[in-house]
Amino acid sequence: MDDSKNVWTARKSVINCSGLAQLNFLKMLSGSIRELVVAEQTQIDLMKQELALLREASLNLHCSGENRNFYSYDRSRGKAVGITGDLDLVYELARRAFLENRIRAMEDNARRLLKVVECSEGLVHERMLQKRLGRFQQAGLDLSRILFTKEQNEWIDAPYSPNPYYPENRQYPTDGGMLMRSKSETTIGNSLEAIGWPYRYDDLVMIRGGHGGEMPHRSSYYSDFKVPNVIGGITVHEHFGAFQIDQYSDNALVRLNDYRNFRVYELPNQAVRPEEFTWSLEADLREKSLMRQMIRRMLLPCGV
């Protein structure tokens, strides 16, 4: 890629739109939903383990004016016993009631989410969507201009200057010819190029101050990747390839803290949301399944 003027656009990173026509957007969404269900099920299992250690009884509360009386109802014996003077038992049974209700609510929510994912109508709509995108592509249209909002497309076409420091370190080309500073970053760049997704590499991030006079540690950074996402915003992604090194990890945490606690604007009047700051480690690139999850988080940042 010719970068003699050191001015690029994210549009130049789109070397082939055919990947966008094949990208399963609903499948991407369903993958994130499944991850959410798995996370909820893990939490449910932990709560059930705790529940098994609590006494098998119900807490009954009777209030009359300022008087409060607590009763323990033994479910197996069908007998209520006053426990007002035993606050430890009161709180144990209150915790039990809370866990029982929370487990029921989370299990019901998980069932509803899985029902949405497994709905056959979704598969029909997905095929119709892919067919329509294929027709647009056959007509010679740029799919990347169709999939993103007006503000995102303006961001994609806007010129930017990548990090000018140590240009000699940019020696690893992607399949599209973008020179990057590490083989790991090249792997991420190739994954985005393979699906025709526009991105900015090594682009400047400006940090705005917080409320009450708070200021970030630094006023600017160069992020590894920025991509338009499917929720209408911009995802800022950092790959921490040497997180095991103390000073490197310290600087990485400072950067993430600034991203999360202060404001960053990539689109007009729209601050980057907390879930739109994503990051990865070397381990995320070693397995295809982890790599797919990482790319999905970039394109569909939903806080999972």
Image (spheres, rainbow, N blue to C red):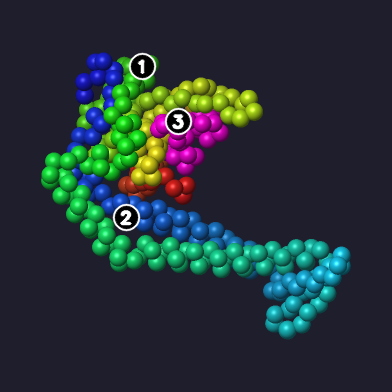
Q: Please tell me the numbered disc located at residue 265.
A: 3
Q: How would you rate the neighbour count of disc 1 (Cα within 10 Å): few for under 14, some for 14-19, many for 20 or more?
A: few
Residue 62 on the magenta segment = no
The reply to whether dot 2 and dot 3 touch (C-beta < 8 Å) is no
The residue lying at 28 percent from left, 23 percent from top is: 8
Image location (x, y in percent) of residue 155:
33, 31
266 above or below 191? above
Q: Please tell me the numbered disc located at residue 164.
A: 1
Image location (x, y in percent) of residue 199:
31, 33
The reply to whether dot 1 and dot 2 touch (C-beta < 8 Å) is no
Could one spot residue 113 in this view of the protein? yes
Give, as a three-letter code, the residue at label 2: Lys
Q: How would you rate the neighbour count of disc 2 (Cα within 10 Å): few for under 14, some for 14-19, many for 20 or more?
A: some
> Whole-Å distance between the Cαs marked 1 and 3?
21 Å
- Quadrant of the image containing the N terminus: top left
Q: How would you rate the neighbour count of disc 3 (Cα within 10 Å): few for under 14, some for 14-19, many for 20 or more?
A: some
Provide the residue designation for mark 2.
27
> Whole-Å distance between the Cαs marked 2 and 3?
29 Å
Give, as a three-letter code, the residue at label 3: Tyr
> Whole-Å distance between the Cαs marked 1 and 2?
38 Å
Say which of 159 and 6 sits in front.
159
Residue 278: quadrant of the picture: top left
The residue lying at 28 percent from left, 52 percent from top is: 24
Residue 147: quadrant of the picture: top left
> Mark 1 falls on what kind of element?
loop
Write the start and end of the magenta stretch as one range: 254-280
> Mark 2 falls on what kind of element?
helix
